[in-house]
Amino acid sequence: MNKPIRTISIFCLVLFLALMANATYLQYFRSEALNDRAENQRVFDAAFSRERGSIIVGRDAIAESVPVDDQYEFQRTYNAPFKYAPLTGFFAYAYGASQLERTQNDVLSGEDDRLFVTRLVDLLSNKGTQGGNIRLTIDPAAQDAAAEALSNVPGDVEGSVVALEPKTGKILAMVTAPSYDPNKLASHDKASVDRAWKQLTTDDSEPMLNRGTQKTLPPGSTFKLVTAAAAIEDGLAESADDQVPGGTEYQLPQTSGDTGLIDNEGRSCGTDTIPFTQALGNSCNTTFAQLAVQVGGDKLREQAEAFGFNQDYLEDLRPQAKSVFPDGANEPQTGQAGIGQYEVRATPLQMAMVAAGIANNGVVMRPYVVDEVQSADLDVVETTQPEEFSRAVKSSTAKVLTDLMTYTVNDGTASPAAIPGVQVAGKTGTAQSGQDDVSPYAWFVSFAPADDPEVAVAVMIEKADIPRGEIGGGVIGGPIAKAVMEAVIK
């Protein structure tokens, strides 16, 4: 072979190898990044032309893909959309996906490795890839009860209800108000989707926000359960009948005047020491501010973190806002934190975990909402196994806390959650917003039956058409929690 031909041959070989290397790079190393690019129209077209799997609650699909006569072949449809949108999220052509539609996308689209056999069968039979299904832990009766009870709060309510199964961490109910209709974002009419997106994203009430997992607020007196746990663990009390600090007022250390003065807003909290039951039953600020100072900021933070504060723990429903207990709090700040104020902030899910941890003999289970992964033919591919998140307190401490909480329902501020014939444990909370033009936040946490808990509930009402002076966690949140607990324990 003469030199010119050899040169051309080598050059062609180099070009061929470069082409092969580039194809390999694009198909194997860059494929995921290219698929995720917003301007990749082919990927969106393929996704919308695929039979996406269903999201199932009980025996019913709350999200499914139904055949339609247009270029995309399937339309994503949400049943009972306002009730379940905070869980399902949306699946939109131009705006991607959220919540379970996003975190479980590989399963729902059929691309998950656990569905390999299904994909192989579809390929051999020349069928389009079918998505897998996910079955949720949600109890339909509990979800219905939470949605109805929350809707009965006067006005344009903003709030959330979360219920857990204490022994497993299963999320039995998660409802948010206001909510939205994800069907409007799943439409194949791009103009109408754009209008719906603009309306939803500019709404000051944030209807697309899952307040159960994504909104943190001061938890107020419900946090006194954490303070009580820390005090018992630290040896400041051993039983529900032990004496603890009381008093009508308490001046925080290193302070003077009204800015550091804690009072009980007229509740009966004695003048010196009082029984622990009276302190929690009447939600005595003076008691828990003093206990917090005695325990100390570091130990109180460690106790809060044992229940889940300052940590991520929800893996199948994202994003999750971290509940916060501040680091490095001084004595007056610790006193404020002990009654759920200062810089303490929590999601309803977090406060449900506090109640559930107490109910489960001090063990906090990791919360989860995806119970099963199924093939398109409803064969179970994987079942989620309950996982211990932490031992928050000793079982003896949990028993004392349960006694305190049952007293609070039977004889204290949490009486609106009482269920005839069932022993209920509960705690109220009313947290100051810190803004003159924003009403206090109403909280309520509970579990039942107290001797063998099946459900733990947290209720948070951020806004409602209720006079400022009448806002209270027991009055507003108690009946909601009661309805959810009754739905579970039947």
Image: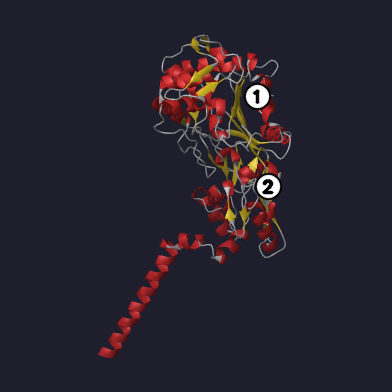
Amino acid of disc 2? Tyr
Mark 1 and mark 2 residues within 8 Å of each other at the beta carbon: no
To which residue does mark 2 refer? Answer: 180
Dot 2, crowdedness within 10 Å: few (<14), some or many (≥20)?
Answer: many
Picture quarter with the C terminus = top right
Q: Position of residue 2 (x, y in %)?
A: 26, 90
Amino acid of disc 1? Gly
Q: Which mark is drawn over residue 474?
A: 1
Q: Residue at x 62, y 18 (%)?
A: 266
Picture quarter with the N terminus = bottom left
Q: Residue at x 60, y 40 (%)?
A: 211
Q: Which mark is drawn over residue 46?
A: none
Q: Position of residue 424 (x, y in %)?
A: 63, 19
Q: Position of residue 70 (x, y in %)?
A: 70, 64
Image: 104 above or below 421: below
Which is closer to the viewer, label 1 or label 2? Answer: 1
Dot 1, crowdedness within 10 Å: few (<14), some or many (≥20)?
Answer: many
Disc 1 and disc 2: Cα gap in Å? 28 Å
Q: State the residue in front, 175 or 414.
A: 414
